[in-house]
Amino acid sequence: MSATTTGGALRVHVLWFPDWPLRAALGAAPPHPPTALVQAGTVSACTESARAHGVRVGQRRRSAQSRLPSLRLLPHDTTADERAFLPVLRLIEAHAPGVHLLRPGLAALRSRGVSRYHGGEEGAAAALVRMLAEAGYAEARIGVADGMFTAELAARAAPPAADDAEPWAVIPPGRAREFLAPLPLAVLGEPELADLLRRLGVSTLGEFAALDVGSVRERFGEHGARLHDLASGADSRPLTPRAPDPQLAREVLFETPLGQSDQIAFAVRQTADAVLLALAEVSAVCTEVRIDLTDDDGAVFSRTWLHPTCFDAGDLVDRVRWQLETIVDDAPDDAAHAFRGIVGVRLAPVAVDDAAHHQPGLFGSGTDERLHHAVSRVQTLLGHRGVSTAAMAGGRMLADRQVLTPWGERPLVPRDPSQPWPGSLPDPLPAEVFAPMRPVRVSGADDSEIRIDERGGLSAAPALIEGTAVVGWAGPWPVHEHRWDAERAVSGHRFQLLDAGHRAWLVFHSAGAWWAEGRYR
């Protein structure tokens, strides 16, 4: 079998890792418990166990939970997908140079070189599957075909690894169109075009490929003609190998375990300088770094750190110290699992940028750069979470609408603020938000308890808050959230109160108790 080209079509090995976003989010190999990743209120990925209960990509969050109330929901961080897939790319490159990243969880290789080395396309697929399984990626599947589009669909059609099945599929040269013909139009990833073609009586790739390409171009333009080529098995996309990473990681080992953060910070300073020197040799700076701390028992504690601009040596040392403090704080108190110290530190740049983009201006650093240095110095004194930046998220309760992220890290907003949130508080919002809400005492004129019935009627008007007279009030406004989830359920009534000291309060009454949610200034 030829491992090069046939009729001008490039032979390609495509490696597919099913449900990669779930693997990146959960940090473990499948099978996974029923879990779904949510982006902008919509399911963007779900596990096989969740799909077995009717959960599907594209469902609204509430619809997915109605199918499976015990479904675990996590925010989808696409940057985490990319970071988690980077070691896999490096692993593939170590055995078959010239890997092409299609997207996290999907990579491609030219068949020629790897197939010649392993004695054929199936031999190359078997070697790659074996290598990935030994590294802990036994779920990987491989498709081999003319062009990346056909090879990807072949990988998705390959069976999972089992005793009686091999997790790869090889489409012989020149047979791409035959393989694609019975597949539905949905595999093109163009739902509007697929819907229009179905209404015209075209439902498979074979029927679409049978149409005259000139008519398709005239009706759907160049993009439609491109899709027609894919359906015909004529994928002309060039395969651009990923440039190999320079050897930028540096590591330091200690003869005796070190347990004090100051000791480790001092010992790792030269390693941080070595990383920056390696970056300088390739005219690059580091904007994202992974720090691996190895303890005396051989356990490795890894974390990826971001930087608003780029790391210097002091920043790297600070991240090592903060990461160590987190490990010590989280260590169990029992003697059997007591923290025994660190024996090795590895600094590995994950994302780099051209150093020319981070040079100071002709007349010195700008205002943003001076602000960054000042805030970073404060963060060094107070710790990693000592300085935070705020981002707006969607939600009905005030605490849900603010997301605090440590300075220097990328904010991850769990709920889209642009979506409609019926029952949320309109502008203007309180300047001070209590998270968590603070208990307060609100009572009637005779210091009596205020009760609220099912219709929102009050037994008495609010007259006192924390012993201060109430001179004006508005409400109640009912709030009912997550009634189907006992742990997340919120039910109560909101009020706005103005006391005699001209302080305005946003209070929440629930289950007979009063809580201060925020305060206006």
Image (cartoon, grey):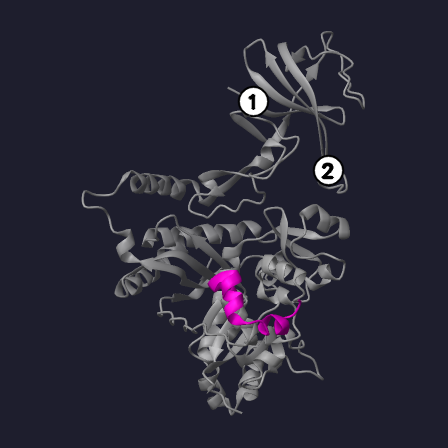
Local crowd at mark 1 within 10 Å, few (<14), some, or many (≥20)? some
Residue under label 2, please give it.
Answer: 489
Amino acid on which the number 1 mark rests in the picture: Arg
Which residue is found at the position 69% from the left and 52% from the top?
Answer: 72
Residue under label 1, please give it.
Answer: 519
- The picture places residue 357, in percent across and down from the top left corner, at 29, 53
**SS for callout 1:** strand
- The picture places residue 412, in percent across and down from the top left corner, at 52, 47
The residue segment tinted magenta is 203-224
Q: Is residue 8 above or below residue 393?
A: below
Given residues 431 and 270, the one toward you in this image is 431
Q: Is residue 472 above or below residue 91?
A: above
**SS for callout 2:** loop
Secondary structure mostly seen in magenta is: helix
Local crowd at mark 2 within 10 Å, few (<14), some, or many (≥20)? few
Does label 2 or label 1 sit earlier along the sequence?
2
- The picture places residue 350, in percent across and down from the top left corner, at 42, 61
- The picture places residue 139, in percent across and down from the top left corner, at 62, 72
Amino acid on which the number 2 mark rests in the picture: Ala
Q: Is residue 170 above or below residue 43?
A: below
